[in-house]
Image (tube, rainbow, N blue to C red):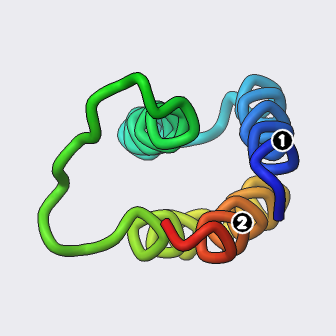
Amino acid sequence: MPQEDLKQSLRSLQDELAKSPSVDPELRALLASLAEEIDDVLHPAAPPRSQGEESLTERTSSVRQQFEEDHPQLAAIIGRIADGLSQLGI
């Protein structure tokens, strides 16, 4: 997945999140933090964030699982983002 497709998926995620007021505030904050970190990775001028030993792709997949039951649209977008990160070797 080219970086531009990944950026589009991030925009889709933000749009879908804006249309989903029922998302738990804690999950919303987690997702916003993850989206910022992904954006930082896609713009190399920003210093990388350290989040422990789990990769960004693994954390993204973990967040996707939290959304699967209650927010399948968001989970699908997050899954595409995780796949894109994996394809980019991130």
Q: Amino acid at mark 2?
A: Gly
For the residue carrying disc 2, how many other residues have a C-alpha within 10 Å: few (<14), some (14-19), or many (20+)?
many
Q: Amino acid at mark 1?
A: Glu
Image quarter of residue 74: bottom right
Estimate the x, y position of residue 67 in percent, counting from the top left.
61, 63
Q: CA distance from mark 2 to mark 1?
A: 10 Å
Estimate the x, y position of residue 48 in percent, counting from the top left.
28, 40
How many discs mark residues in the rendered view?
2
Q: Label 1 belongs to which residue?
A: 4
- What residue is shown at x 47% (from left), y 42% (from top)? 41
- What residue is shown at x 65% (from left), y 37% (from top)? 22
On the picture, is 69 further left or further right than 44? right
Estimate the x, y position of residue 16 in percent, counting from the top left.
82, 36
Q: Secondary structure at mark 2?
A: helix
Camera-side residue of 81 and 75: 81
In the drawing, what numbered circle is on residue 84? 2
Q: Secondary structure at mark 1?
A: helix
On the picture, is 47 further left or further right than 29? left
Q: Is residue 37 above or below residue 36?
A: below
Camera-side residue of 57 and 27: 57
- What residue is shown at x 78% (from left), y 66% (from top)? 80
